[in-house]
Image (cartoon, rainbow, N blue to C red):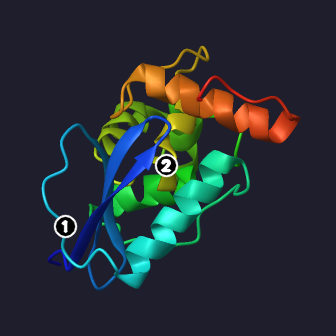
Amino acid sequence: MSIIAKTYCDTPLGTVEIAATEQGISHLKWVEFPTYEIDPGNSLLIQCIDQLTEYFEGNRTHFTVFLDLQGTDFQRKVWREIMEIPLGKTATYLEIARKVSSKDAVRAVGTACGANKHLMLVPCHRVVGTNGNLTGYAGGVSRKRKLLDHEWGVLFGKQGELF
């Protein structure tokens, strides 16, 4: 599907580019230099910005905006499983692999996380190594830590180090 709308949203962790197709939000990614916008008044983009704002204000625990999850069947299965991880909680790559396939699929789960184009909307930042260590994240491990700290603060009344 081709992008019909694109805009940018400033967050406490940097600027994100949000793009939409007719099916839903097609990607949400960190950008250093915004380029141009296409129909920034698109209702999907506005809904996504509103939900991101609520998330960073601590008033949203999950996202409901429609997503256009473009990927393989296995990737979509992994992403759907990751969307089930509650705010402030984590799951390991091994746990996700067992839920979607088998324990032998740990690397494939990691690859699916790396292919995720929806940042916080498909919260790959909640997936950690088996020993609990933070591992790769498209936005960088420091952003991953800040997102987890933020969510922990929302749940337990303690503001994270985001702002």
What is the number of callouts on the image?
A: 2
**Mark 1 is on which residue type?**
Glu
Furthest residue in direction right, as rendered: 157
**Residue 152 or residue 129, whichever sits in front:** 152
Q: Earlier in the sequence, mark 2 or mark 1?
A: 1
Is 95 situated left or right of 109 in this image? right
Is 159 situated left or right of 85 in this image? right
Identify the residue at horizontal 50%, vertical 37% (top origin).
12
Residue 143 percent location from the top left of the image: 46, 28
* Marks 2,1: beta carbons within 8 A: no
Is 142 situated left or right of 29 in this image? right
**Secondary structure of residue under mark 2:** helix
Identify the residue at horizontal 59%, vertical 29% (top origin).
163
Residue 55 percent location from the top left of the image: 63, 52
Classed neighbour count for the residue bearing mark 1: other residues with Cα under 10 Å, few (<14), some (14–19), many (≥20): some
Classed neighbour count for the residue bearing mark 2: other residues with Cα under 10 Å, few (<14), some (14–19), many (≥20): some
Residue 135 shows up from this direction: no
**Secondary structure of residue under mark 1:** loop
**Residue 155 or residue 80, whichever sits in front:** 155
From the image, tell me which residue sits under label 2.
120
Question: How far apart in space, not on screen, are marks 2 and 1 (Cα)?
Answer: 21 Å
**Mark 2 is on which residue type?**
Met
Q: In the figure, 135 relative to 151: above or below?
A: above
From the image, tell me which residue sits under label 1.
37
Residue 13 percent location from the top left of the image: 45, 34
Residue 14 percent location from the top left of the image: 39, 37
Is the N terminus in the top left, top right, bottom left or bottom right quadrant? bottom left
**Residue 77 or residue 116, whichever sits in front:** 116
